[in-house]
Image: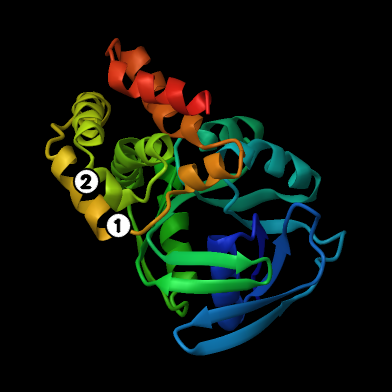
Amino acid sequence: MTTTWHILGPGAIGSLFGCYLQQAGFGVHLIGRNGGGPQTIELVESDIITRHQFEEAPPDQPISHLLVTVKAQQTLAAIEAVRPRLAPQPRILLLQNGMGAWEAVAERLRGAILLLGTTTEGANRPAPNRVIHAGSGETYIGALETRHQTEAEALCRQWANLPLTLAADPNIHGRLWRKLAINCAINPLTAIYDCPNGDLLQNPHALAQMEAVCTEVEAVMTQVLGEETRGLFTLAKSVAAQTGNNISSMLQDVRKQRTTEIDFITGYLLEQAHRLGLACPSNQALLNQVKQM
């Protein structure tokens, strides 16, 4: 029997994964802000365009496999909207920026098998029905609870025919922390200075702030992960250079006057720092500035 995936939040990444899952033979239904009506998406890869038609899900069809790609701050509301349709023990994969949303989901859905993912696939959506695959990356999946790691491994086997570099990671928590650290170092500063990632490297004041942020993040990560964390400032500068023309999602939200993910990036870091009794004044200052924008 073919597995059917429901995708909650078919933005750029959600739509990309939806197209890939459909190409691999899975049933796919998209659930956007206006429900799960039929939708056509054009997937652009280099000079090749493929059209994917997604049908509306039957209203009485239980959701057994759910891919969540909404922004972190939208997660709970989005989950609550589909909660009546969830199967008794659904497989739910959260593929988002930031950290902390899964804790609230786990509290609400105690019977669910929660998987966490992170991807560096590049995608953008210039129009609601058009997705451009901007660059290949790597995708890692792990379990929120160790006892469910076999489910992450099974999912990677299930997705083996998708055109992704995909692997199960038993230390997904550490991988997500490293991604969070880079987001803390870059995203708030791009929002404050209203610039692409790479422009931070030409701004001495921004670089000084980035270095201070990285020092604080290293102290928190060392305590949380139980291993010394170093070299974050160098890594953050390297990522900013590699993604020089990129407009961070946080800056995009600020420009469009939308709520940002700051509470699930810098805010999450500060929550963990407070729990550990560590002061992070540089990160606190950035959080305050972004929330006032």
Relative to 67, is 225 on the left or the right? left
Relative to 36, is 68 on the left or the right? left
Give the answer, above or below, for where 271 lies relative to 85.
above
Q: Residues within 10 Å of mark 1 (few under 14, many from 20)?
A: some
**Most foreground residue, 116 or 243:** 243
- Asked whether disc 1 touches disc 2, contact meaning CB atoms under 8 Å apart, the reply is yes
User: Where is residue 268 drawn, in percent x and y?
Assistant: 43, 27
User: Where is residue 102 drawn, in percent x and y?
Assistant: 52, 37
Give the answer, above or below, for where 101 lies relative to 280.
below
Q: Amino acid at mark 1?
A: Gly
Disc marking residue 82: none
Residue drawn at (33%, 50%), measured in percent from left and top?
197
- Residue holding disc 2: 201
- Residue holding disc 1: 244
Relative to 61, is 142 on the left or the right? left
**Most foreground residue, 71 or 150:** 71
Q: Secondary structure at mark 2?
A: helix
Give the answer, above or below, for where 153 lies relative to 20.
above
Q: State the separation of the CA atoms marked 1 and 2.
A: 9 Å
**Most foreground residue, 33 or 22:** 33
Q: Amino acid at mark 2?
A: Leu
Quarter of the image for residue 220 reads top left
Give the answer, above or below, for where 41 lies relative to 171.
below
User: Where is residue 199 drawn, in percent x and y?
Assistant: 29, 49
Of callouts 1 and 2, which one flags the residue occurring earlier in the amino acid sequence?
Answer: 2
